[in-house]
Amino acid sequence: MLQNEEANKYINSFSDEVSARLMLLRNMVLKLAPDAAEEFSYAMIGYTLHQKPLVYFGAYKKHLGMYALPHTHAAFAAQLGSYKSGKGSVQFLHSQDLPLELISNMIRFRISTIKTGS
């Protein structure tokens, strides 16, 4: 997958700590979905797989936002209970470690729904 130049600029516009967190998420998506296309839209980094939205990440002053569509968030509602979240979004505070296993599982779930057409 080619990295999007706007996404690179976006990542590099943050502090080293926040940039490192964004790169960690980027690398996770690349590992789990090497065929995903990276884009920069809605003022955040996004990925599509087979021309369908996979996941979006955005950095904010106090948190990273992850957007993996409402049905993905609904499937992981129990695990997301301790995080501030909306219908299709969840916030991970910069002051806390990223829940990498949870994020990975959510991305895997979304990949499977894309592949099965669910």
Image: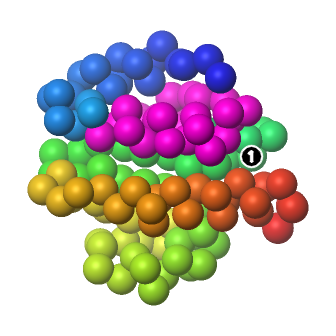
Residue 82: percent from left, percent from top: 29, 80
Q: Position of residue 50 (x, y in %)?
A: 80, 40
- Which sits in the foreground, 41 or 106? 106
- Helix, strand, or loop for circle 1? strand
Residue 43 sits inside the magenta stretch: yes
Q: In which quarter of the view is residue 12 placed?
A: top left
- Residue hosting label 1: 52
Question: The N terminus appears in which quarter of the rendering?
Answer: top right
- The correct choice, above or below, for 67 with respect to 78 in the image is above
**116 in the magenta segment:** no
Residue shown at the point (38%, 38%) measured from the top left: 24
Q: Residue at x 17, y 28 (%)?
A: 16
Report the span colored magenta: 21-46
Residue 68 image point, x, y percent: 55, 58
Q: Residue furthest right?
A: 116
Reply above or below: 1 against 88: above
Q: Is residue 66 left or right of residue 93?
A: right
Say if residue 68 shows up in the picture.
no
Instruction: For residue 14, say whether it is visible.
Output: yes
